[in-house]
Image (tube, grey):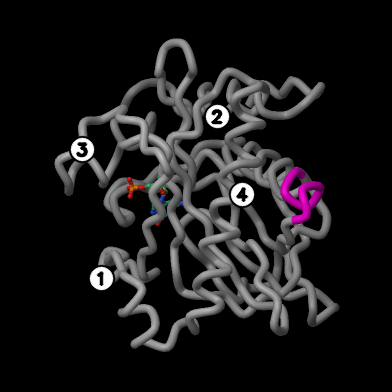
């Protein structure tokens, strides 16, 4: 695999073909970026933490009857996933006002959103992932109405499962981003669910435990990722030193 070129390389992950056309290898690299790639670094050991947390959440979702592209881990930073026809949408679930919601609308940071707010962005970095509404999604032909309804139902169920699990670990799930893809007619969760795609706050201190530490220079990103991985993964403290 190392000698092959990826069929897709994003800002922090690369996808490779495998001998089986129905499966792909997803490598979590040590690269970290923010602000549409305006800020970039490489942090040794970051990829394996995101891979471990993603695989934990994918397994948790599967146990709760939600299908994902996850098949198995291949190594610390690579997973074998089902090949999907990806839907070019970012589905963001927000439980607490933060980030772009606070920047763009008159919400006070930290306001609890009940019910949770679902925001759908068009996945296109060149256009800075513009926010969509149902009519635009339907007019673009990205999804039909039934699939859009299913997507939102999945997002709400996933939010319930993840929020409940994180609460047990003293962590608030502020918001997170999901991507989905089709396997035939079925819609599966794809991409990753990690510190790069979630906003996590410590329940007691509201300290950031996610990529905001990198975005806004709030501290040592790698030690945050290391300690939050240890809190999220059951019975499996993260003993690595890197
Ligand atoms: P915001 O819209 O506040 O910037 O982001 C909301 C949530 O979605 C955050 O948890 C953020 O990490 C995640 N998110 C939004 N856009 C992206 C993206 O393009 N890539 C990743 N990895 N996460 C995103």
Corner quadrant of residue 130 = bottom left
Choose the circle earlier in sequence order: 3 or 2.
Answer: 3
- Please rate how many residues cluster around mark 2, counting C-alpha atoms within 10 Å: few if below 14, some from 14 to 19, many from 20: many
- Of mark 2 and mark 1, the one earlier in the sequence is 1
Q: Which residue is mark 2?
A: 225
Question: Which of the two discs, 2 and 1, sits closer to the camera?
Answer: 1
Q: Which mark is residue 127?
A: 1
Q: Residue furthest front?
A: 115
4 and 3 marks in contact (CB < 8 Å): no
Give the secondary structure at mark 2: helix
Cα separation, mark 2 vs mark 1, equals 29 Å
What residue is shown with label 3? Answer: 107
Pinpoint residue 151: horizontal percent, then vertical percent.
Answer: 55, 66
Above or below 105: residue 209: above
Segment colored magenta: 60-65
Between label 4 and label 1, give the one nearer the viewer.
Answer: 4
| Disc on res. 158 | 4
Picture quarter with the N terminus:
bottom right
């Amino acid at each position: 695999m190392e000698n092959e070129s990826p069929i897709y390389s994003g800002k922090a992950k690369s996808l490779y073909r495998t001998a089986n056309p129905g499966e792909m290898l997803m490598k979590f690299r040590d690269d970290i970026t923010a602000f549409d790639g305006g800020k970039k670094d490489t942090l040794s050991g970051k990829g394996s933490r995101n891979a471990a947390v993603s695989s934990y959440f994918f397994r948790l979702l599967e146990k709760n009857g939600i299908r994902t592209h996850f098949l198995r881990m291949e190594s610390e930073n690579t997973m074998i996933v089902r090949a999907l026809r990806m839907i070019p949408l970012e589905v963001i679930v927000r439980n607490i006002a933060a980030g772009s919601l606070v920047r763009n609308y008159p919400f006070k940071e930290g306001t609890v959103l009940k019910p949770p707010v679902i925001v759908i962005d068009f996945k296109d970095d060149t256009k800075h992932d513009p926010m969509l509404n149902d009519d635009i999604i339907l007019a673009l032909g990205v999804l039909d109405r039934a699939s859009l309804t299913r997507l939102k139902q999945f997002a709400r169920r996933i939010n319930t499962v993840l929020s409940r699990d994180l609460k047990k670990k003293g962590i608030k799930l502020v918001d997170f981003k999901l991507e989905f893809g089709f396997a035939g007619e079925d819609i599966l969760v794809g991409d990753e669910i990690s510190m790069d795609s979630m906003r996590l706050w410590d329940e007691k201190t509201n300290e950031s435990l996610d990529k905001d530490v990198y975005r806004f220079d709030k501290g040592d990103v790698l030690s945050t990722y290391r300690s939050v991985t240890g809190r999220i993964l059951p019975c499996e403290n993260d003993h690595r030193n890197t």
